[in-house]
Image (cartoon, rainbow, N blue to C red):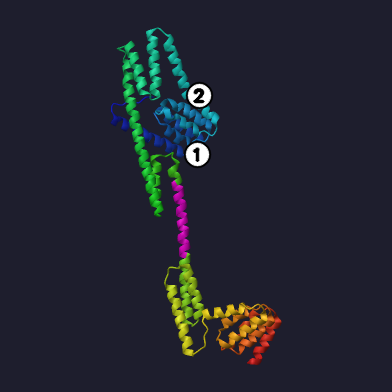
């Protein structure tokens, strides 16, 4: 049907009313999964309201079968106000045969009718018939938004019947329909702009991790254009982002709990005088949060206290840096007997801890070589009470028994 309006403002008001009806139509379709009910909602709207190809595309989104899309397209075509864009509808079909069929029964049919009308105008002589055919041709042009061409045809009809009220109404209808289309397209453009701004605002909020606010923007956008996938996909993306943020926060909380536990454990080890173990624990805490300064401060404290203890007890001490050089010089020897000789020289000249001695023992692969070095180390250590710990460095029980007998005899 053709809506008539008096002014542009009236056209704008009429459009917004039609837009509200369209939104209600889409909401009704969204409220059910029944394909037939959805189709009936759409058919009711497009049979009674002038609409755009964009609206028809939006509704097609909720119809799964080509057959129903075709039936709706045929029914909606007379009320489509932008028929020159109708070709975009054909992409909505999964099978090209249905798109071709829709074309044959809409645009091609209208073109054939126009051709047929032109032909009849060329052959008829009766003025009444000419007038009727001119009105029909004008209607075809008007329905295709060819306003100037339609006006020209109606004016030709008016020349035949100058006082014909129908013809004069048709001429008025050209102006009002043109106004109506301009108002609708302008309002649609404004709505699209508002839609895009809401999407953009949502994107900015999402990039700032303000997920709930972003979703609110996307929902407002979806309310404006219910059939547009953009807002729906953005909401889906935001919800995924929300879950990822939740996982990151949970992981961060778990890391923080582990960090606090390690700091507490390190403090207990320091208070017990186990400085080397404490340093290892604080280094683990530092690896979790490298920017945190507390673990570094605790490591420095543990090293200071360890050094103070060494100084107080006048205990000979080999730094880790020096020991690293010692170990490399031993490993650098080609044969095991050369390694043992180099190890003996370093053991004689340096004060090594049990841990450092264990590191030297690990260089040798054979239990016999290990056992010989352990016995040699015994006389060069101030921690002889800990030599039972070397049992774990020996692979065979026979070597372990020999070490046990050696230590018993030494005591």
Q: Pointer 1: what residue? A: 33
Q: Pointer 2: what residue? A: 104
Q: Which residues are magenta?
A: 234-253
Placement of 322 over or under 226, stated as above or below: below
How far across and down, in percent of the image, does residue 34 sit? 50, 37
Nearest the eye: 160 or 370: 370
Placement of 212 over or under 114, stated as above or below: below
Cα–Cα span, label 2 and label 1: 31 Å
- Looking at the image, residue 2 sits to the left or right of residue 75; the answer is left
Quadrant housing residue 10:
top left
Q: Residue at x 38, y 51 (%)?
A: 205
- Looking at the image, residue 237 sits to the left or right of residue 188; the answer is right
- Judging from the image, what secondary structure is the residue with disc 2 in? helix
Which residue is farthest top?
A: 125
Assess disc 2: are there few (<14), some (14-19) or many (≥20) residues with their C-alpha within 10 Å of its C-alpha.
Answer: some
Which residue is farthest right?
A: 398
Quadrant housing residue 13:
top left
Q: Residue at x 40, y 17 (%)?
A: 137
């Amino acid at each position: 049907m053709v809506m008539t309006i008096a002014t542009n403002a009236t056209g704008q008001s009429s459009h917004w009313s039609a837009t509200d009806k369209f939104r209600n139509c889409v909401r009704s379709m969204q409220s059910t999964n029944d394909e037939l009910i959805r189709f009936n909602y759409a058919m009711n709207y497009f049979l009674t309201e002038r609409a755009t190809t964009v609206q028809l595309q939006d509704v097609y989104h909720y119809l799964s079968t080509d057959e129903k899309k075709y039936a709706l397209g045929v029914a909606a075509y007379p009320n489509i106000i932008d028929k020159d864009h109708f070709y975009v509808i054909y992409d909505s079909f999964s099978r090209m045969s249905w798109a071709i069929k829709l074309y044959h029964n809409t645009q091609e049919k209208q073109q054939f009718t126009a051709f047929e009308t032109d032909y009849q105008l060329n052959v008829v002589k009766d003025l009444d018939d000419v007038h009727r055919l001119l009105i029909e041709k004008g209607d075809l042009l008007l329905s295709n938004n060819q306003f100037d061409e339609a006006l020209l045809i109606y004016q030709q009809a008016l020349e035949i019947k100058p006082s014909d009220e129908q013809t004069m109404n048709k001429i008025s209808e050209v102006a009002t329909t043109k106004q109506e289309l301009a108002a609708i397209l302008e309002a649609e453009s404004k709505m699209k702009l508002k839609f895009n701004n809401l999407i953009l605002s949502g994107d900015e909020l999402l990039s700032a991790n303000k997920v709930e606010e972003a979703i609110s923007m996307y929902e407002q956008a979806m309310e404006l254009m219910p059939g547009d996938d953009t807002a729906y996909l953005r909401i889906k993306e935001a919800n995924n982002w929300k879950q990822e943020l939740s996982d990151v926060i949970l992981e961060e909380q778990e890391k923080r709990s582990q960090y606090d536990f390690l700091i507490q454990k390190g403090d207990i080890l320091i208070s017990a005088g186990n400085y080397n173990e404490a340093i290892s624990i604080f280094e683990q805490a530092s690896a979790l949060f490298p920017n945190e300064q507390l673990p570094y401060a605790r490591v420095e404290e543990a090293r200071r206290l360890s050094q103070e203890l060494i100084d107080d007890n006048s205990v000979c001490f080999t730094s880790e840096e020096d020991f690293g050089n010692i170990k490399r010089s031993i490993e650098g020897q080609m044969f095991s007997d050369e390694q043992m000789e180099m190890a003996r020289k370093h053991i004689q000249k340096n004060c090594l801890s049990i841990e450092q001695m264990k590191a030297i023992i690990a260089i040798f692969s054979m239990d016999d070589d290990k056992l010989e070095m352990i016995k040699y180390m015994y006389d060069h250590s101030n921690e002889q009470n800990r030599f039972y710990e070397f049992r774990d460095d020996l692979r065979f029980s026979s070597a372990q028994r020999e070490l046990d007998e050696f230590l018993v005899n030494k005591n």
